Every structure is written in C-alpha cells, then in structure tokens.
Image (cartoon, rainbow, N blue to C red):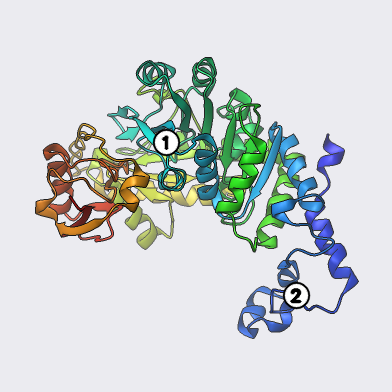
Amino acid sequence: MEDRQKRMPLFEAIIEYNEKKPAFFRVPGHRYERGINPAWREKVGDEIFKFDLTETPITDDLHHASGAIKEAEDLAAELWGADYSHFLVNGSTCGNQVMVVTTVNGGDKIAIPRNSHKSVLMGLIIGGGVPVYMMPEIEEEWGLHGGITPRQVEEMFEMNPDCKGVLIVSPTYYGITSDIAGIAKVCHAHDAVLMVDEAHGAHCYFSDHLPKGAIEQGADICVQSIHKVTGSLTQSSMLHIKSDRISKSRLEQNLTLVQSTSPSYILMTSLDCARQQMALHGDEMVEAAVELSQTARDRLNTIPGIRCAGKELIGRAGIHDLDATRLTISAADIGITGFDLKKMLFDEYDVDVELADYRNVLAIVTYANEKEDLDMLCDAMQDISDRFAEEGQPLPPGEHLPAQPDYVLSPRAAYFNERERVPWFETRGRIVAEMIAPYPPEIPVIYQGERMSQEVWEYVEAFRQRNGHIHGPSDMTLSTLLVIRE
C-alpha cells in the first residue's frame, strides 16, 4: 500500500502536461503566469499559476473521472478505508448536500441533529426531504452541545419507522464525538443510511490517541474537510463511501448538481498532495499535534482562573470521545466571556483563535503548529490571569434552549412558499421562512417551516435586546423577519 501511496497522480499529470508546453487555446484565459496581475506575481511567484488548468487529454475530468483524478480518488479511498471516494471543490458544504439529496427521495424522512451545519438544510431544500430533528444535550459546565446517543436514534426510529437515514455531526467544531459505532448498528437494524458530517475529523484516522473515524466505525458515507486540519487548500474536501446502501450512480448524478462545472485543479491537486503526505507521514504528524495540544492543556490548567477542557467531558451529555487537538479554553471563572477573550488575545497578544462563544474560545492545533505557537497562547493566558484573576467574578450560567417549536412545512416547502417581511414583534404564531440561530450555541432555535412560539420568541428577544450574535435572518438587526404569507 505504501508504495502506491507515494504517487500523486494528478500532480504528476499536470507536470506532464506543462512539460509538453502546448500552444494554449483553452480556458482559463490567464495563460499561466503571463496574464496574471504583476503585483500578485511579485508576491507569490509564477509556478502556482501553471497548476490552474482545466480538463485536458492528460489532466482528466472530475465529473467523468477515468484517469489521473480517478487514480487520485482511489488512493484516497484506500487510505481512509472507503469503497470509493470523490474529490469535492465546493467544500464540505456540497458534500453534506449530496449526502442528504442521495438519501431522500422527495418526501422521505431524514433524522438530523439541531446543531447540523446550514449546508444540511440546503440539502433538504434541494432534495425535498422531511427532517426529523434530534436535539443534542447541552453540557452545562462548559455550555457546549454534546453528542447524539444510540438510544436517541432508536427512540427516533420508534416514532418514525419510515425514516430513511440519519445524519450525525462528529466530531463537532469543539472535537466532541458521538457513539458512531452504536448509532451505525441502530441505523442498519432499521435498514437506514448513516451519514456523518466529519468535516473536522479527517485526522482521526491517524492516531490511537484520537477518536476513531466514522468510516472505521460503520458509517455508510461521510464528508471530510481535508483543508481544515490535514493540509489541502481551503474549499477542498472529500466524500468517502463504504456501503452497499448508497446508490453509486445516483450519488454521482447528484454530485453534478452541487459541484462546479469548472473545478479548480489547484484545489484538486492540493487534495492529491495532502493525501500523499498523510499516507507517508500522517501518523507522526498527527501524534505531534496531539503532544503539543496535551502539553498546552496541562499548562493552561495550572493557570489560576483558566481552564481547558479534556477527557473529563467523556460520558457527559452524550459525549462519546473528544479530539485532543481541540483546545476549548475558558476564563469564565474570572468573569471574561469567550467573545472578550478572543478579542483580547488578538488585539493585545497577537494570538488568533478559531472562534468564541459566551464561555469559551477554541484553538485548533495541527501538525503544522510549532511549540512557539502554543507558548504564545499559554503565555497570553498566564498574563490575562495575572491581570484579572484576583478581582474577577465568575460569569453567570448561560440560558437554557427553548423547546422545539411546532413543525408545519418542510424546509423546501417553506423556501419556495410565498413570503412576506413583517416586524419582529408581529412574528409570534407565524410560520417563519428563515432560521434563527443565536450564537452561542449556534443551534437553530427555529428553522424555516416552524411556527414561532412564545418561548422561542422570548429567548431570541433576550439575545436581540443585548445585541447578541444571531445567525440566519437576512435582517441582521432582527427588526423584521421573513414569514410565510398566510
């Protein structure tokens, strides 16, 4: 296997094409570096532009792959343990969409957690599926949404025996995983497809110190953002299938719905090269990230008023395992919100973390980080503790999510229904046409097609009054909201 994995078929094909130096009368129009803005060339050099090609007799065609791209995809499938894999140039967004559209046929039911990425909702709009929502439990101490349990999935099937598939987010942004093996057994006992949004988990296949990957645990299909932690360029992802429950022809037809007809060869080459690097050095690379993370976690947890989440979360709120390379850091004990902490780290210490919520910030550690990066983070947190720990007061707990509102229309029906914009104060009792996801925890408290309850309205209004972060509505001030015209 390792000898085969040394190859980079697409990279090699582009090198072969460029060595021919043909007179070029195809798109793209920049003709290698010659048509590129000189200011850009001065900063990045010329060679990268020679990889921005299109379908040629040598470089294959993503939508009908039979040559270099097909070979590269086959090597990816072999590495991640899939039956077959596909390169994605529209990110994991299109991977989630195609998983949903392939599983549902118009009105079929599909179970999804309320914390699914908005691309899953896009898939429901495209494919017309009927969602059966599952709510992950909230881990109260850290304010994080946990996992989905096999028992929750079994209970869902008891109420919805005609459900065709289940989609699970694992790992989540915070590195929290669900019991995928247990959920797979439940799904397959009901002849249903298990889909996993594994956008944040491509590296989990390369270390015994991380949660097992979804394909290893019996998932039928998963999507991975290779660019997030395993070395490809932003917007490049992969779709892995290991199942006879997925129609290969239907899946490939649906990929043409959501992928560009002009796929980026730079992005695809980055997938090919990242796969080869992971095949040859992935174990040592990921282990280095784990070691850096754990050393930093241990140090952070010695700083007064600062905490960094670890394995103690396992077993709470449906949390089956935790990705050690995700550092969830809190200064809530000394009264600093995650939002303020993120801003402080960047403005005052030149430390840029991935995201913030009310209680925490999240730092993602990869094999490309160095000890100096983690030292800067830990030194910053030590200084913040020295400044604020003595006088800071613990933050009050966050608010509990309201009960799920009544489901009236499918997301597709709501999306294409006639809509009107009304003042926010007139939305109670109306069927909404936009989702609302207060941040944190960025779990939609209402999806399009659901009826606005008094409880949800009051919960969102509290966020609105304190100028909280709200994702989803087209009117970001939430002075108005789109609702279904009745």
User: Residue drawn at (34%, 34%), measured in percent from left and top?
Assistant: 144
Of 212 and 96, nearer the camera is: 96
User: Residue drawn at (43%, 60%), measured in percent from left and top?
Assistant: 350
Q: Secondary structure at mark 1?
A: loop
Q: Residue 109 occupies which quadrant of the picture?
A: top left
In this figure, which residue is indicated by the disc labeled 2? 26
Q: Is residue 176 left or right of residue 203?
A: left
- Residue 165 at what x, y percent from top left? 48, 28
Compute the Cα span from label 2 to label 1: 43 Å
Quick check: 273 above or below 180? below
Q: Which mark lies nearer to you, 2 or 1?
A: 1
Three-letter amino acid code at the position of disc 1: Gly
Asked if residue 324 shows in the view, the reply is no
In this figure, which residue is indicated by the disc labeled 1? 107
Q: Is residue 254 left or right of residue 129?
A: right
Three-letter amino acid code at the position of disc 2: Arg
- Residue 270 at what x, y percent from top left? 69, 55
User: Residue drawn at (90%, 71%), measured in percent from left and top?
Assistant: 20
